[in-house]
Amino acid sequence: MSAILKRRFGLALIASLALAACGSEPNPAVDYLKGVVGGAKTDSNAGGVVTADQTAQVLAATPSPVEFVNIEARNSQALMIGIEQNGPYSTYGTAARQSLVLRSGMITATRGLGGDLMSSEEDALLRAVQSRQAGNAGYQMHFLTPGDETKTLSFQCSVVPGGTQAIKAGEINSGGTVMTATCRGEGGQFDNTYVVDKRGTILAGRQWVGFTIGFIGTQALRR
Amino acid sequence: MPKSRSARSRLKFWVPGAAAGIATAVSAFSAYGQETPFVPSRNSFGVPGLIDMPTAEVDPDGTLSATMAKIGDSTRTTITFQITPRLSGSFRYTGIENFNHPASNADGVYYDRSFDLRYQLIKESDYLPSVVIGLQDFVGTGILGGEYIVATKSVAPGVKITGGLGWGRLGSYNSFGTTGSRPNVVLATGGVPTYDRWFRGPVAGFAGITYAPNSKWNFSLEYSSDNYTEETRLGQMSKDSPWNFGVDYRWKSGSQLSLYHVNGNEVGAQFSIVLNPKTFGIPGGNEPASYPVRVRPAGSANDLGWVGNDAVAASAKSELRALTQKDGLTVEGLHLEARRATVRLVNPTYGAPSQAIGRTARAMSRTMPTSVEEFVVIPVVNGMAMSAVTMRRSDLERLEHDNADAMLARTAISDAYGRLPKADPGIYPKFNWSLGPYLAATLFDPNNPVAVRGGLRATADWEVAPNITVSGSVTTKLFENGNGAIRQSESALPRVRTDAPLYKQADNAIEYLTVALHGRPGKNLYSRLTFGYLEPMYAGVSGEILWKPVNSRLAIGAELNYVQRRDFDMGFGLQDMVTVDPVTGARREIPNLNGHISAYYAFGNGFHGQVDVGRYLAGDYGATVAIDKEFANGWRIGAYATKTNVSAEDFGEGSFDKGIRFTVPFATLLGTATRRTDNITVQSLSRDGGAKLSVRGRLYDQVREYHEPDVARSWGRFWR
């Protein structure tokens, strides 16, 4: 008396199936495997090292704001171009449709990077950083879990001013105060660092963006 | 943010060290490690334990594991699922070689299925151990049957001690007392709870200690109370010592490879893989970003100059269609009014309905005339309007950078009956096809425990009109393992499923070839009529109607089928409904009519229940109860059981139909947006009682997806 294992595709055979199957609909598994075979990873589109020539080309090619972005753990750099503005929130994107949202230079969200920061409660932290004085601020980050639930990480940040730092990059030739926010919360702590000019704009920063992405460095090349 | 676009001529081309300036400016960054939930080691029975003995350790909620262990002549393959934070269940398939039992196959291998349940009574605290009560093989033939109460306590870093009391198999060595009497026969058919045995008979103690010097290695020592009585009596195993030793190598995910020395004379090995749908995969996926919301210029919301200008409306529609297409979505129609835009949406891409809706809404914000304030998105499946999701454009503009909950609170989901814009001309008919390899497996046949067939499969869907679909699938078999011999067993019922092996011999087969009509006969109502070759064994007509209010957790459905038996060659031919038993020669007739009334209920805590009551294929009457644990990302793990007015004796091995089932969304495996899923059903046995027609496209799963409970559950993906 046999029982039946009903399935449309064998999981163990996804690879062979996906590579062999064809049809009228695009097959995401094929793209994925091509990426794996070709050595591309999630950050491939933003990947590589940005050269001076590329920077020049991008600045020449667009009148829009340009931000240099470095995902440290992936050793992946990209130039992102301002594509939309919603109140104080600026969305920057790559051609591969990965995006970053900055509010006065502070990262408040990412999209398409894998493990995205979905949104933040950054009001207090941003105010504290912009003040260029020592202070404390609450800070919350919202993520999706692999199970598609929303997970909120809450932190208390202690913000301290450091020295001044010159920023010469792209069209930016300025400088500001180095502000370090040491944030403690569920499960650990991290240090975010920002260079803030007199108008309260973050010209450059290094910010923790969650367990999956880690730290992202940003620097304005044109505002 | 102030913008400076001047002074391009004074550019200094600044290179990679963008972060270099920053790096010099900052001191040390502390590492922020991700905590991975600890998954305890599994024993040879595939549950948290030492070597053969269980411990009171408990998996994180949602953990799914598969374990294969071999000790001497005994091979155990176990799937364990942590159903709730305290309750877990296991399904096991055991093979014992050299076993002198009437049910053993020609090679002397005895195969047996078993189910376990474990419940945590006390959670570990500073002073108290974790305490678990367990039932092993509690509905099977009883050969692995045993019960236990076990306690485990961490006593030093990496050191845990365990002690427990066992009954049945776990009370068989060096017992120190008895609690009542325990029937000790190995049941012939099994499949019903053996409650007359639980915690009865001889009771023995077991104990163990584990030491994990780091996260990779784990050493175990146990005193086993399992005497391997049946394996000694009917097989060639024996017990020389109660002391077992083992070592596990553990991966970060919790997967493990183990070696052990058991019974003083056997060497054993085991491999376990562990996966948790809650924590497996890339959080939020890897798919590209959507387009951001475009905020209307201040004061433009009252610009009604475009109204009545068909060109503006037409261009808005084509822009919307182009933008959504880049997101893998299809806008089939648009009804544009001065203040409201209603979209007819088909979502072939996203598993989470909220993500399809959120991306459509953002595309609308970039394309609709500025006076349009109300966005209505109506997802369509098989021509049926599933729900009307109504949002205010100013809310989208205001809440884009807030937590997704804020937008959910401002979104209304209502019945779309009568509100669906027509599909634009030229969209239908649609034709989709695919060609690829297939693999099918039949498990648990004692003569060929894993019978595998494979070949090529071609499928096609021709959507003649939005609600009329012609679908077909043909296969050609290229290989199969074993000798292809048909194992035909005796049945006391019309052979509605025990004849399945005859169909599996077909080299070229039409799996199905159907015409399906879908409709919305009224508010809260959905309908399906399917006719043709409905499944591999039956052709006919299947009609279904479903009542499901859009905000309700409850749905009620009814299905009525008129079937005719197909020829064994799975071609176009049909045959009469009289089956002949190959063992007894008995002729029995399959009735043409079968069907069910079904109730579906989403409990809202991740659990989903379904009850079907009706007449099954063989003409038997009864009910099926199914419970599934559902994850927001689309994983489902569940179990079902069917009891009809067929006696356990007439049903045969297993006593009644039951099984476990899994739905695996490919998106979580691949990290990209895809609606493809893998549905796997492991039936404990395929018998003729409680068998259902396997018609495709039952309504409920299509309908619930775009209704309020499911949309709200995955709402976190609205802005993804």
Image (spheres, coloured by chain):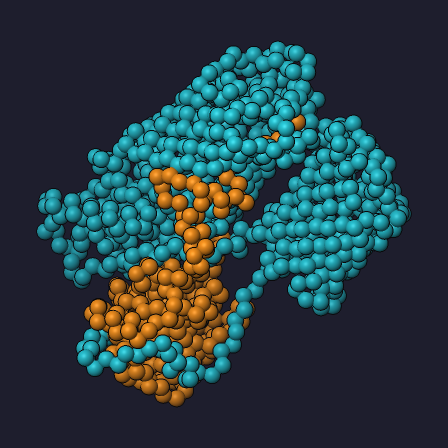
Chain colours: A orange, B cyan
Confirm whether residue B685 shows in the render: no
Q: Nearer the viewer, residue B514 or B506?
A: B506
- Residue A71 at x, y percent in the picture: 41, 69
Relative height, residue A219 to residue B53 (above, below):
below
Q: Residue at x 33, y 30 (%)?
A: B462
* Residue A113 location, quadrant: bottom left
- Residue B290 at x, y percent in the picture: 32, 55
Could you tell whether B210 is left or right of B612 in the image? Answer: right
* Residue B308 location, quadrant: top left
Tally of marks: 0
Q: Residue at x 86, y 43 (%)?
A: B238
Q: Nearer the viewer, residue B401 or B63?
A: B63
- Residue B521 at x, y percent in the picture: 33, 27
Could you tell whether B653 is left or right of B697 in the image? Answer: right
Relative height, residue A199 to residue A208 (above, below):
below
Q: Quadrant of the C terminus of chain B?
A: bottom left
* Residue B125 location, quadrant: bottom right
Confirm whether residue A58 shows in the render: yes
Q: Quadrant of the N terminus of chain B?
A: bottom left
- Residue B127 at x, y percent in the picture: 73, 64
Could you tell whether B168 is left or right of B637 in the image? Answer: right
Q: Residue at x 60, y 60 (%)?
A: B252
Q: Nearer the viewer, residue B100 or B593?
A: B100
Q: Residue at x 49, y 36 (%)?
A: B438
